[in-house]
Image (cartoon, grey):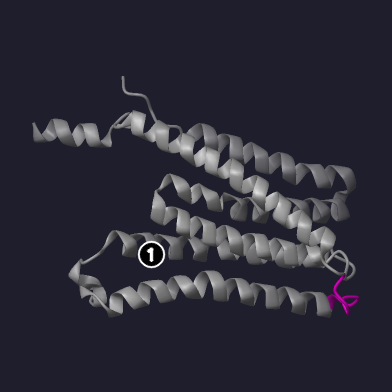
Amino acid sequence: MKRSEEKSMTNPTYHASDFRRQRSVGIAGIAVASLFASGLWLGIDLLMSPLPGMDSLGARMLLTLKCCCAAVLFCLVTGVEAVAHERLTSPAFDPLAGFETRRLRINQRYLQNTVEQIIVFAASLFGLAAYCPDGSSMRAVVATTVVWIVARAAFWLGYHRSAAMRGLGAPGMAISMIVLLYVTSRFGSEIAGTVGAITPLVAFFAIEAVLFWGTRPVKAG
């Protein structure tokens, strides 16, 4: 009996109906969040006043560094603090004691995910700034930063509601990927013209297709 239960727990079809329900909720959350994030990004990029003193590359890089600092403070440091405060006031003070609340586990996962994503975000932001020649175009850097911070907050709050609702933070990763694709395409264009611009995009989406296909759950025979 025990062996049968263990087998069913590792079966990809285990609780399939619950998985489909959560996936539907997650996809709906991603769709709504993406619309909101797009509107927020466009609103900042179109309505914000051009940033003064952005004619030099050094000034643009400095502004980008400041944006990264804001993102680290509001997204990464807050996650560290959330975990630290709970450990300070509970038996989780000893990490080896094995005491973990659901809230602590979620905060730890948020923290790990943010560490991973902030590397992607920072690389994309500095790359974007390199291709923004003036204060008007640098509004895109500010808009990207604001959307990413809001998306991280949505991911965190949504995760505390349910696993599916963490999909509200998907625009954060999406915008980092879009910016990286833009930067890589521009870089490729500088090296090899149109072919150089297209090749990285084709290669990336080919890898995405392989990953999507290769990570599908195996149906039980």
Can you give x and y, in whole percent of width and height, for residue 65 in the image? Answer: 70, 76
Residue under the point 75% across and 65% down: 141
Residue drawn 81% across and 56% down?
187
Left or right: residue 142 compared with residue 82:
right
Quadrant holding the C terminus = top left
* Quadrant hosting residue 137: bottom right
Identify residue type, mark 1: Gln
* Residue 188 vertical placement versus 50 (above, below): above
Picture mark count: 1
Residue at mark 1: 108
- Give the camera-side residue of 179 and 157: 157
14 lies above or below 191: above
Residue 80 occupies quadrant? bottom left
Does 98 sit left or right of 161 as displayed? left
Residue 36 place in picture, x, y as percent:
66, 50
* Residue at 64%, 46% in the rendered image: 34
Q: Quadrant of the N terminus?
A: top left
Q: Nearer the viewer, residue 122 or 92?
A: 92
Q: Position of residue 196 (x, y in %)?
A: 82, 47
List the single residue furthest toward the top.
221
Q: Main secondary structure of the magenta part?
A: loop
Residue 130 appears in view: yes
- Between residues 29 and 63, which one lies in front from this camera angle? 29
Name the residue located 44 percent from the left edge and 44 percent from the top edge: 164
Q: Is residue 53 above or below residue 28?
A: below
**Residue 120 in sight in this render:** no
Tell me which segment is drawn in magenta. 50-57
Q: Is residue 173 magenta?
A: no
Name, please, the residue furthest toward the left. 1
Judging from the image, what secondary structure is the residue with disc 1 in?
helix
Q: Position of residue 211 (x, y in %)?
A: 54, 38
